[in-house]
Image (cartoon, grey):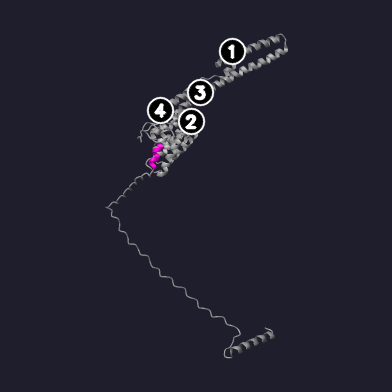
Amino acid sequence: MLPVPMLAASLATWLLAAGAEGASKPVPLFTPPPPRAAPTPAPAPPPVVPAPTAPAEPPPVADEPEAAPAPAAEEPPPPPPPGAEEDLAFGDHLFDDGDYYRAVTEYRRYLFRTRGRGEAAPRVVMAIGEAYLRGAQYESAALQFDSVAEHRGDDVTSAVAGLSAARAYLLDDRPLLARPRVRRLFNNDAAAPALRAEAGLLLGITYLQADNYAKARSILADARLVNGPRAPLAKALLNALGARDRLPQKSPLLAFFLSLLPGLGHFYLGQWAVGLTALLWNGLFIVGAVDAWVQRSWGVAIILTLLELTFYGGSIFGSVSGAFKYNRDQELNWRDSVRAQYEGILKLPDPTAGTQPGALIRFGVPLDLPTP
């Protein structure tokens, strides 16, 4: 309850306000709250209209067969843009002059102008690899041929490109990179016999270059190879492997026992001058040492004996090491001759007259292909 002074003050304030506005209009002590508005009803949802039903299709007539779709007409190749034919002709000219690197630039300009869809594009991409290969840029050639083998749909072109990539890796002394490329083609029964024979020959060379002579012999003696178009080259490499088995060898053990008589081990190796020198010097030292021992010249006898033992041991060691060196030289000479033989196989043949750079016939594969 409010205190009396405050209640009196409120009553006086109310009376003053009522007197100012007039006695006819009462002033309420408290303002009543406004009335609440009635809630607006939510709109009714629209009526659902059913979707129209599609008319049923009539059953197909069994007597009328369906017409086959007409084959799509092949679009003719777009005409070469201006300057493309000049770039190609200039690239061929540079290639024929032996300026392979500038020829590659012109070939790439041609492919850029035609977006790789020119009429001569399949030949040009192979010509780039051929230019690298003839210019001894073997890794660049292998990468170019790998790209052609991956992106070209023609089976023959892809196979020749894969063989050329393997050839480039072999010329670069990387047989492990060349081997999977030729093994797939050699084991592909659907490939042309000429392509399989070429792949088998290169596969044998990969093992030959890696000094795996037993595996190389088994590949080169395969019936698919010795009875194919590469039979003469395969038989020549087989004969070279047979010559390795017939290399003259010297026995280090026999040289050791013969060299117990100074000079005789060198005579066994065919080193007649060295053997005669060893025989004379050892003989002199032996005679001198024996005479010093007989004369009881102990100092001279000891010195001559030590010198003789040094010369005698050196003669024995020279005979044994000479036998090992003889065998090693025979092996190295055989490797050099065989390497020269298969490198001649790996190198591209001289261009056939009338053929253009990049033509498949220029890659040494024995195929009956039209000359572009």
Quarter location, residue 285: top right
Q: Amino acid at mark 2?
A: Tyr
Q: Are marks 2 and 3 in contact (CB under 8 Å)?
A: no
- In the depicted view, which residue is nearer to us: 20 or 159? 20
Q: Position of residue 148 (x, y in %)?
A: 43, 39
Q: Are marks 1 and 3 in contact (CB under 8 Å)?
A: no
- Compared across the picture, whether 61 is left or right of 296 comes to left
Q: Amino acid at mark 4?
A: Ala
Foreground disc of the pair 2, 3: 3
Q: Residues within 10 Å of mark 2 (few under 14, many from 20)?
A: some
Kindly state the secondary structure of the residue where label 2 is placed. helix
Q: Position of residue 355 (x, y in %)?
A: 37, 34
**Residue drawn at (62%, 18%) of the image:** 314
Q: Amino acid at mark 1?
A: Leu
Q: Position of residue 40 (x, y in %)?
A: 48, 75
Vertical relation: 240 (above or below) 180: above
Residue that numbered label 3 is attached to: 333
Kindly state the secondary structure of the residue where label 1 is placed. helix
Question: Cα distance, mark 4 to mark 3?
Answer: 25 Å
Residue that numbered label 1 is attached to: 276
- Compared across the picture, whether 36 is left or right of 161 comes to right
Q: Residues within 10 Å of mark 4 (few under 14, many from 20)?
A: some
